[in-house]
Amino acid sequence: METVEEVMLRAYDKFNIQLQSIQVLYATGNEDWRSARRMGNSNMHVLRPISIHLCLQKCMFDKDPRMAKMKVSGELPLLSLGLSDYRLQQLIDLGMSIPLPEPPDTDMEDIFALTIRKKPKGPSTLPSAAEPDVSPNSLKKVVNPPPGGTGKSSSLQRATSQEYVNATDMELNFEIKKVEITLSQRINKQEVPMVRLLVERLGTTMKMRTFDMSVEAYLGGIYLQHLKLKDSDQLRDQLINNKLLTVTDEGPIINIINTPAHKDPKFKLLTVSYLKANGDGPEFSTTYGNTEQSINVHFSALEVLLHLGALLGLMEFAQSLQPNIPPSTVKEVKTTEKDEAGKEKDGTVDKPKRKRKVKPKDPKIIDIKVKANLDSFGVAICTADKLITDVKIKGIESTVAVQQAKTTVAAVIRDMIVFDPSPKSLYPQILSIEGSEVLKADIVAYNGGTEGEKFADMNCVDTSVAVKIGCMKITFLNKFVTDLLAYMDHFQTAKDALKEAGETMAEKSLEQAQNIQATAARILLDIQMKAPLIVVPQSSTSSNVLCVDLGMLTLGNEFQMAKAKASDGSPAVMDQMKIELTSLKLSRYWTFFIQLLLPIADNTEYSNALPFRAKSSVICCSFLALLMTFLDKLEKCIPVIYCLIQLLVLDLSHCMG
């Protein structure tokens, strides 16, 4: 006996569509494209043969809410593209040789618009499908249906009974099993493969229902492989141990972008889900949590290898791919302004549109909510001879919720480690975290938080910022820093761009800091930062170190109403900030422990008069001014620390000598 699921599977009319051997070739006049088309794989193939399978299913029982009325599914087993710098330039030249149609004459457009405006007025003699027949005879047919007929009243009753059923109107599933893109470089009239991009299981699913619509896109894995580069045996062993190099039949292949291997065949590297709910639905407040749109992004694990030779080769190859497009002459089209006086003469003056009354919105409703999770992300930096460093970041979570009254942002970073892969180093971790979290931030921006009657309430703010920073242990190794700077010297263009961006940002910050009294908003700060623990060893193989503990930094503020008032009678608001620095220590670990600097504690209070009308749309730079005050306060400790470091250097040089 058949089950209900089997009966539901057979309750669809199926239509199968299949396209096979779709291919695109580009050949010059002396190339045999017919033989290449039969081969299916050659240097002339831009798109290698693909097959597409589509299945359309229509439900025969549209009254059952459990069954989708329409199902569409598709599958593409392989999408393979191949292109070289030479073929790309030839394709661009071919496209530029195709003549484009000239733009239409503006005079003809004006004549056509004039004829439309001067159309004959009066009632139309043609029947309109939008106007129903409201004659008395037609009303009798609806009110008194003929015997045995269904009538419209019964259909209305059925619609009312199914009004709150969340039936599925359509389901869509499409997946590309594998995407392969190969870029080649023409050397001595031979096309040599340079880069290969592999994407596994790229697909999407969609469901359209009565009260919601859900879309999910996913990516199984991604690999960017450099096919031309060869490295030393030492680097090859290090990359294989870190799973950054794959050994195939073609030999060892460097993965610039790599997805870690996983035992689950249904593993997904990236998943993006989108849900849009109807606010008038019966389960909007319960099932959907008063959220109209929600986006969930989940990133599992990804590894990036910044290989010096590979990056320089890719940059050179990218420059060769830039097309040589000749400067094209574009005809300027003269636009004439419409004569408003002529409009008035013709009686075609546009009437002002009436403003629709907007229904007041529930403040509890969330317009859009975005959640993003990153499980693991790794970046490795290496040259042709050795691996310089390996960075691992784990557990990044962020949430953004937008409402009518406020916008909430929350972010958490769980762990971050920077490794030194030198085999004989006593300090394998250049940067590590002591605790459970690196960073936790909660930011709330209120819309009109201090406008109107709220201005006199000191508990009302424009933005509230709460930040907790964990303790980071940083090990300073001169050899590590030197290797990293030598690596960065090869990218002088990128360094110049970063320097220019930094200078521009500094200028803008300075301008905002100078205008802080005119544009300040009421920002509530609650910052707790465990300052980093800095370890400076004598060398990577020595146990003699200098330890700098920067202690604990606490920053907070509160607002108070001042007695002074402006000329218009508006009260002034004072922003009182307080900085606490505790447990600042400096120690030296030699054959015995020496505490060079006793723990220092310092309190700093900073007061700032806010403007009489705070603007919530402008970002406040109070934190910048506060940081400058803190640095001025800390300046008295710098000479002492500098002298102690000099003494330590003298001791080290004496011991080494």
Image (cartoon, grey):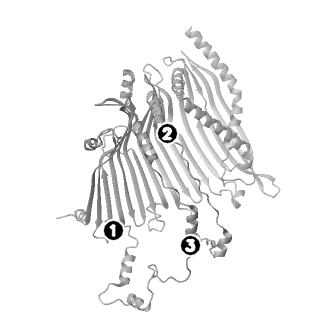
- Label 3 SS: helix
For discs 1 and 2, the disc positioned in front in the rendered view: 2
Is residue 222 in view from this perspective?
A: yes
Q: Which mark is residue 115?
A: 3
**Which quarter of the rendering shows the C terminus?**
top right
Three-letter amino acid code at the position of disc 3: Thr
Q: Is residue 546 above or below residue 17?
A: above
Sequence-first disc among 3 and 1 = 1
Q: Could you tell whether 161 is left or right of 292 in the image?
A: left
Looking at the image, the residue that sits furthest to the right is: 567
Please name the residue that numbered disc 2 is placed on.
Answer: 324
Q: Could you tell whether 379 is left or right of 598 in the image?
A: left
- Label 2 SS: loop
Is residue 389 in view from this perspective?
A: no
- Say how many tags the image has: 3
Q: Nearer the viewer, residue 258 or 542?
A: 258
Q: Residues within 10 Å of mark 1 (few under 14, many from 20)?
A: some
Q: Which mark is residue 140?
A: none
Three-letter amino acid code at the position of disc 1: Pro
Three-letter amino acid code at the position of disc 2: Asn
Looking at the image, the residue that sits furthest to the left is: 1
